[in-house]
């Protein structure tokens, strides 16, 4: 058992976390005469290490997830969801969201397709919530930085929000608040052509390139912000605003996260830096969830397809769920024992 535990720590630190890469970059920068303990040296090391690490993980994860996704085109997904009813349909819909696009905006076209296909509104909203909030990529990336316990708990609680939110919308019978053009949108229910293994690999490669082009600017921005927080903002500031001394830190982090537009790949470096500076775990995760789930661009897009009452309900459910998750993590944070780069 001890050997298995040691292997898992090695896998988490050196394979997923790539701490060897951080040491190597530090060695290279030091050999140029740059002082790693200085703010400038620490910022450069943080930036280079996180950009390379996240880019490598991003490309590998997108390839794997896209290959899996090639087996679940929209037509097949509709048929799968159509076989389930009640809360079981919400659970399957939320799980299906974990193998779909990485940001909230790209999930909305699929939401329209599912709604026009006649799937229950609550089921489609469970998908819409889970798709940007929790995916296989977020699970692996969170494991690489925050550890297995945090990653699994984050994903499970995200799925709970998606299932509960979709179920509540279903129970409130909000169908009349969906714009008519969505309900009457043309829907061709055909089987997707069967792809060969070579075609699936080619599809996955194309998705890697396409997603990388869209996501990479946010990685640079997120890592840049993280480097500034990590090396230039005093720890006392972060502690006073997002630490245990401020009982409203979770709410503040959620409200700050909503106007931002990024995905899990761009928010993790910021979250990592905030945590290293003394922000509470739940507060940091609430910030991440708010950024990925309730960005202004996605809300604007959603406003075009649902009426204000349903849009307000959706935002309220997500925001309340995110805040609850934040406080739950803060209360039980001692169970997770997160190790950051500054504490290793």
Image (tube, grey):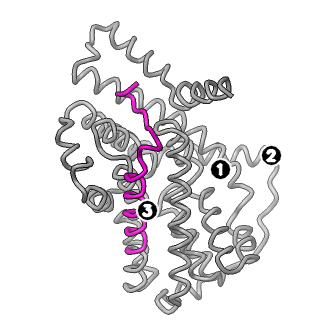
Q: Which residue is mark 3?
A: 293
* Image marks 1 and 2: residues in contact by CB distance under 8 Å: no
Q: Where does the image place residue 308, in percent across and percent down from the top left?
A: 37, 84
State whether residue 99 is above or below residue 51.
below
- Residue visible at 43% across and 50% down in the picture: 332
At mark 2, the secondary structure is: helix
Region in magenta: 316-344
Mark 2 or 3, which is nearer the eye? Answer: 3
Is residue 101 found left or right of 74 in the rendered image?
left
Pointer 2 with pointer 3, Cβ within 8 A: no
Q: Residue at x 46, y 29 (%)?
A: 52
Q: Residue at 37% x, 72% y: name it.
A: 300
Q: What is the spatial separation of the Cα atoms under label 3 and label 1, in whole angstroms?
A: 21 Å
Mark nearer the N terminus (1 vs 2): 1
Q: Check the image and report above or below for 298 versus 208.
A: below
Q: Earlier in the sequence, mark 3 or mark 1?
A: 1
The span from disc 1 to disc 2 (Cα, nearest Å) is 13 Å
Provide the residue designation for mark 1: 66
Q: Residue at x 51, y 60 (%)?
A: 158
Which quadrant of the rendered structure holds the N terminus? top right
Residue 30 placement, left or right of 132 = left
What secondary structure prevails in the magenta region? helix
| Residue 70 locus on image (x, y percent) | 71, 55
Mark in front: 1 vs 2:
1
Label 3: element kind: helix
> Residue 272's x, y, as percent?
37, 39
User: Which mark identifies residue 197?
Assistant: 2
Is 206 positioned to the left or the right of 106 in the image?
right
């Amino acid at each position: 058992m001890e050997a298995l535990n040691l292997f898992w720590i090695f896998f988490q630190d050196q394979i997923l976390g790539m701490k060897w890469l951080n040491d190597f970059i530090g060695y290279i920068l030091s050999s140029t005469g740059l002082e790693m303990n200085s703010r400038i040296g620490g910022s450069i090391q943080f930036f280079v290490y996180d950009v390379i690490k996240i880019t490598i993980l991003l490309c590998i994860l997108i390839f794997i997830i896209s290959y899996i996704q090639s087996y679940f085109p929209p037509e097949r997904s509709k048929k799968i969801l159509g076989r389930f009813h009640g809360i079981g349909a919400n659970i399957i819909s939320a799980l299906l969201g974990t193998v779909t696009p990485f940001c909230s905006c790209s999930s909305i076209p699929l939401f329209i397709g599912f709604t026009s296909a006649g799937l229950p509104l609550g089921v489609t909203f469970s998908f819409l919530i889970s798709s940007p909030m929790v995916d296989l990529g977020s699970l692996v990336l969170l494991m690489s930085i925050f550890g297995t316990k945090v990653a699994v708990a984050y994903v499970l609680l995200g799925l709970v929000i998606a299932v509960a939110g979709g179920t509540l919308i279903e129970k409130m019978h909000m169908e009349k608040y969906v714009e008519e053009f969505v309900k009457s949108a043309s829907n061709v229910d055909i089987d997707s052509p069967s792809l060969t293994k070579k075609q699936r690999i080619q599809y996955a490669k194309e998705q890697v390139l396409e997603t990388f082009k869209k996501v990479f600017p946010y990685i640079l921005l997120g890592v840049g912000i993280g480097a500034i927080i990590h090396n230039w903002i005093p720890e006392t500031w972060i502690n006073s605003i997002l630490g245990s001394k401020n009982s409203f830190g979770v709410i503040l982090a959620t409200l700050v996260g909503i106007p931002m537009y990024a995905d899990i790949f761009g928010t993790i470096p910021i979250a990592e830096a905030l945590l290293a500076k003394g922000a509470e775990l739940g507060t940091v995760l609430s910030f991440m969830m708010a950024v990925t789930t309730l960005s202004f661009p996605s809300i604007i897009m959603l406003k075009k397809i649902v009426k204000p009452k349903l849009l307000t309900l959706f935002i309220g459910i997500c925001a309340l769920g995110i805040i609850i998750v934040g406080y739950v993590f803060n209360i039980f944070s001692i169970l997770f024992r997160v190790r950051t780069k500054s504490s290793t």
